[in-house]
Amino acid sequence: MNNIQDSSNKSVTGKSSMAAKNKRNVKALATWTSAWLVSLALVAFGPKLLWNYDNVFTLCAIFVNLLMGYKMIVANKQHLIDLDELQQRIHFVAMAFSLGISMVFGAVFGLLEAVRLVEFAPNPSSVLFVMGISYSVAMAVAHRKYS
């Protein structure tokens, strides 16, 4: 009887420990992603609005952005490592679709001006938008498929 209670407590403790770890990982990922986004905005708007295109400040902002990006990648990796196998599989499928869609879209989108289908220079941030949308849709589809 005690063995049954012990194994039951272990599974509850394991689930609660996994939930706590997941919460901590999501918080770290949100923190570093936010820091990266703020530092990216600083790189994008700081030279014009804050420091009149001074190269030293711009290079410092780029360095900070790269550092925040690195920390975001490490937090994302840790989050993925600590997920269970099913959650990892869902993310893996979503990432595969997002990578493929982003590559195909980015290649064609980058050529639109060169082949004179548009008058404007395509903005690389549009590829990030497509990547985010495709990842979100693929996550929803994969979650529905595997759950």
Image: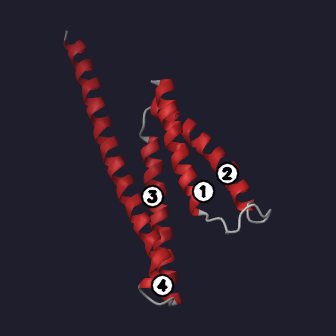
**Amino acid type, residue under disc 3 in the picture:** Met
**What label does residue 127 carry, if any?**
1
Residues at badges 2 and 1 in contact (C-beta under 8 Å)? Answer: yes
Element type at marker 2?
helix
Classify 60 as above or below 138.
Answer: below
Residue at point 47%, 27% (across, down): 144
| As drawn, 89 above or below 131 | above
Give the CA distance from mark 3 to mark 2: 24 Å
What amino acid is found at the position of numbered circle 2 in the picture? Phe
Q: Earlier in the sequence, mark 1 or mark 3?
A: 3
Percent position of residue 94, x then y: 55, 39
Which tag, 4 or 2, sits closer to the chain's start? Answer: 4
Residue furthest toward the right?
115
Q: Mark 2 or 1 closer to N-term?
A: 2
Mark 3: which secondary structure?
helix
Q: Of 105 and 38, which appears nearest the observer?
A: 105
> In the image, what residue occupies the spot 47% across and 70% down?
65
Residue 82, image x, y percentages? 41, 40
Residue, disc 3: 72
Q: Amino acid at mark 1?
A: Val
10 Å neighbourhood of mark 2: few (<14), some, or many (≥20)?
some
The mark found on residue 48 in the picture is 4
Mark 4 and mark 3: Cα distance apart in space: 26 Å
Q: Secondary structure at mark 4?
A: helix
Q: Quadrant of the C terminus?
A: top left
